Image (spheres, grey):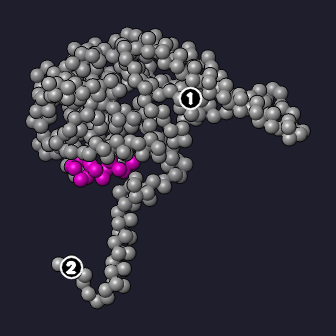
Amino acid sequence: MTTPSRLPDPYGQGQSANLADILERVLDKGVVIAGDIKINLLDIELLTIKLRLVVASVDKAKEMGIDWWESDPALSSRARHDELTRENAELRERLRELDPGRVPKEAS
Amino acid sequence: MSGLRYVYAVCRPFGAALQAQLTGVAGDPPRLLAHGDLVAVVSRVPEADFGEEALRAHLEDLDWLAGTARAHQQVIDALTAVTTPLPLRLATVFRDDSGVRTMMERREDAFRRTLDRLEGRVEWGVKVFVEAEPERPAAAEPAPRPVTGRDYLRRRREQSRAGEDLWTRAEGFATGLHSTLSSLADDARLHAPQNPRLSGAAGRNVLNAAYLVRRDASEEFVERVDRTKDDAPGIRVELTGPWAAYSFAGDAAGEEEAGAGS
């Protein structure tokens, strides 16, 4: 059993810890175990890289009114959904122009 | 019991109680799941948020991710106060208790080895920043306005030389600090520098290191870092910790892979 000895007071930790410091550790470090719920680790790695580039401090960014990632399809699932909806509508429109009045069929 | 199991860490059994008001990533207080001479620290999470599809979507939602990461870290932090946890990566989720036990059974040797290596040790983070502009004695003695173009160019050259000096000095400072701190630590890792514009920290991050330090050597370590802080104008040193040994826990997976290969 561990008996922790006296430790110095925490530095830059707890509630006030920089989100970049926390994410760096909880996403990037620690023991990697594939649980029953599969998450694609590549996703997390990519996300970490993006986060490193984009939002090392979400709170800070929000404070400053920066929220552009919310409309970036690469970073936000909502934006990706919007993007798909828009693309879908556009494709449907073009199909209608090419082949008015007919449901397109696969050539066989 | 319904719900999935979110595992924060694996550790040796410990006597102390966790903080009563400690909540996990989805509000359920973490509890201990014993298996042999190891315990997993586990809380229940709803499938609606931690099932495969939901989790994938959530991980791209920065608010959710930030909240979950902080909750995860709070549990690890509480564990670090009473024992030496082996922290797992964010969002390690199993269907039920028996899934967690099977995982522990399969990895118990690697867990034990890593826990032995980390026993009684914590991680300290040290970052070195170069302030954006070298300090100028402008206030004391306002520089005369450049009269000629040549004056101006000379001034610019001096400024850029001062900048280069600062960089050279910062590099030397960081290298020296890293070697001093490494000698006080059992292990060290260099991490990628954090992006200056977005970490909210002023200046450019030139050293981002983690040190594995014995608890009883931590006071000396912290004092040593503190002492360097005023040594170098234009250079800032930032200390964070004590963290659980996140940066030194990863080897458990490697050990297992190595074991599986032979």
Q: Are marks 2 and 1 on the same chain?
A: no
Please provide percent x and percent y for residue A8. Answer: 43, 16
Query: Chain ID for label 2?
Result: A
Q: Quadrant of the C terminus of chain B?
A: top left
Closer to the camera: disc 2 or disc 1? Answer: 2
Is residue B234 visible in the rendered image? The answer is: no
Name which residue type carries label 1: Phe
> Residue B38 location in percent, x, y?
16, 22
Magenta range is B50-63
Are dots 2 and 1 in contact, CB under 8 Å?
Answer: no
Residue beneath disc 1? B129
Residue B5 sits above or below residue B119 on the image: below
Q: Residue furthest right?
A: B147
Name the residue rendered at 12%, 37% in the picture.
B99
Query: Circle 1 marks a residue in which chain?
Result: B
Image coordinates of residue B231 in percent, x first then y, are 61, 17
- Relative to A35, A15 lies left or right: right
Q: Secondary structure at mark 1?
A: strand
Q: Which mark is residue A107?
A: 2
